[in-house]
Amino acid sequence: MEALIQFDQDYSKYYTCIMEALNSLSYFQITISLLLIFAVIYITRRQSHVYLVDFSCFQAPAFHRISVGAFIEHSALREEEFNTTEVNEFEKKVIVRSGMGNETYCAEGSDFIPSDNSLKQAMIEVKLVLFTVVETLLKKHKINPKSIDILVTNCSINCPTPSLSSLVINKFGFRSNIRSFHLSGMGCSAGILAISLAKDLLKVHKNSLALVLSTETISSNVYLGKQKSMLLANCLFRIGGAGILLSNRKCDRKVAKYELQHIVRTHLGAKDDAYTCVFQKADEDGKVGVRLSRTVVHVAGEVLKTNLTTLGPLVLPYSEQIRFAVHFVWTKFWPRTKKQAPYVPNFKKAFDHFCIHAGGKAVVDAIKERLSLSEWDVEASKMTLYRYGNTSSSSTWYSLCYLEAKGRVKKGDKVFQICFGSGFKCNSAVWKRISKVVSKEVCNAWSDRINRYPVDVPEIIEH
C-alpha cells in the first residue's frame, strides 16, 4: 500500500511539472509548434513519387539479324575499301572474344556493301526503333498521345534538325504545349541521364506523364578507316532502343511496375584522361569514328568508385556502412606492411538484381569482380550482350526485360542499373518493384525464346 501511495505521489509531481512547463509556454509558441508539426506531416505526405508504369524494348525484324560468321564475311567483303587484311583479322578477333552471339541485329545501312552511313539511312533506322516502342506502349496501355506531358529522347551520334523529339511529336500528334527535350553526345549513359531529367521535371509538374526514348543509330556510326582503336565500335554496337513511361500521378501507382528510389550521376569530365578516353574524331585519312583509349578501363574503375561512394550511404544497411567506416579508419591510422585492398561493401545486401551496361564482356566482368558478384548476378547483362550486343543507352533495359521474362523480379525487390558513357560518366538508378508479376502479362523482347537462356557463351563462341 505504501508503494502505491509513493507511486501516486511521484506521478503527481511529474504531472505537475509537465503542466507547469506547458503553462509557461505562450499560446503563440504552442500554435507555432503545432503548425510546424502539421507542415512536416503535410510535406512528407505530398512528397513527389516517380513511378515506372511500363517500358518496352525494341526487337528488330528477323531480316536484320547478323550472325558472327556473317559479320566476319561482310568485313572481308569490305576489305577492298580498307586495302588491307589487317582490319578484317582484327575485327574477327574482337567479335569472337566480345561475348556476342549469332542473334544480334544490325541496321540496314551498316549491313550494306559498301556501308551506307548517310543521314537517310540513319533516319530510317531511328524511325523504325522509336516509332515501334512508342506504338507498343501507347497501344498496350490505351494512352492517348495527347495525354503525354513530357517527352525526353536521347541519341548520341544522330542529332538531326528538327530534333528526334520533334520527329516523334510529328508522328504521333502530341499536343502543342508538351515539354520536349533531346539529349545528344551523352554516350551509353544517356539512358539513365534521360530518366534523371524526366524525374526532375516530374517533381515540378504535378499529375504528369513522361515518355523517355533511348536509342543509338548504328548506320551513322560505321567507321571506314584502319585505326584499331576506332574499329571497336563497328564490332560491338548493334541496333536497339527502349521506351519508358513514367508518371507522378497517384492513380498510376496501382498499375505501375516500379518506383524510382535513387539516381546518382558522376562526371569526371574535368580530367583530361577521362574526357578523351571515348572520343569522336577523324583519323589521318579523314575517316570519322569513335576512338576508345586504352585508359578507358582505368577511368571506368575510377568513376565507378566515385559513383558507388555516393550511392552507398543511400542504399546500404547500417551494418555494411559501419564495416566500411571501421575498415577505412583502421587502414588510415594503422597501415600494414603490405598494401591492403580497399574494403568493398556487399551491395548484394542492398539490391536483389543487377542490370549492368552491356558494353562488352570485359566491362561486365570488371564490374562483377569489383562488386564481388556471382555469375547469376550478371547473367542478365551477359545474355543481353550475347543476343542484342551493345545497344548503348538502352542496354540496361534489355537486361531488366530478361529478368522479367525469367520471372525473377518479385514485389519488393530492388533493381540496380548502372551504365558508363563518354565524358566520362557513370550513372546509376535504383528501382523498387511495387506490383506483383503475372507471368501471362510478361510479353517483351525476350518472351519468344527466353527458355533458351542462359547459354554457355564461351563454348558457343569458340565453336
Image (cartoon, helix red, strand yellow):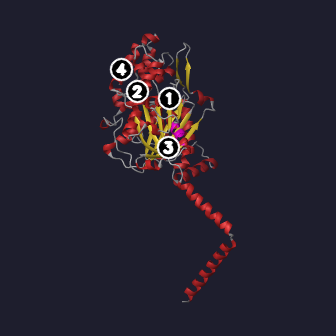
**Residue at (68% x, 66% y) in the render:** 28
How far apart marks 3 and 4 lie (CA) works out to: 46 Å
Q: Are marks 3 and 1 in contact (CB under 8 Å)?
A: no
**Which residue is under mark 3?**
208
Residue 173 in the image: state x and y as whole percent.
Answer: 45, 32
Q: Residues within 10 Å of mark 4 (few under 14, many from 20)?
A: few
Mark yes or no: residue 461 visible: yes
Upstream in the sequence, badge 3 or badge 4?
4
Query: Which residue is under mark 4?
Result: 70
- Specify the amino acid type for callout 1: Ser
Question: Of label 3 and label 1, which has the lower sequence position?
Answer: 1
> Can you identify the residue that label 1 sits on?
166
Q: Considering only order in the chain, which callout, 2 or 4, is on the residue closer to the N terminus? A: 4
- The residues colored magenta run 193-199
Foreground: disc 4 or disc 2: 2
* Number of numbered markers: 4
Is residue 269 found left or right of 367 in the rendered image?
A: right
In whole angstroms, how far apart are the C-alphas of marks 3 and 1? 19 Å
- CA separation in Å, label 1 and label 2: 15 Å
At a point 39% along the width and 28% down the height, the residue shown is 100
| Among the 4 quarters of the image, the one containing residue 373 | top left
Q: Quadrant of the C terminus?
A: top left
Q: Which mark, residue 128?
A: 2
Magenta highlight on residue 196: yes
x and y, in percent, of residue 101 in the image: 36, 28
Observer-nearest of 317 and 54: 54
Element type where label 1 sits in the image: helix
**Of the residues tagged 4 and 1, which is closer to the observer?**
1
Image marks 2 and 3: residues in contact by CB distance under 8 Å: no
Q: Is residue 331 above or below residue 119?
A: below
- Nearest to N terminus: mark 4 or mark 1: 4
Relative to the observer, which residue lies in front, 134 or 230? 134
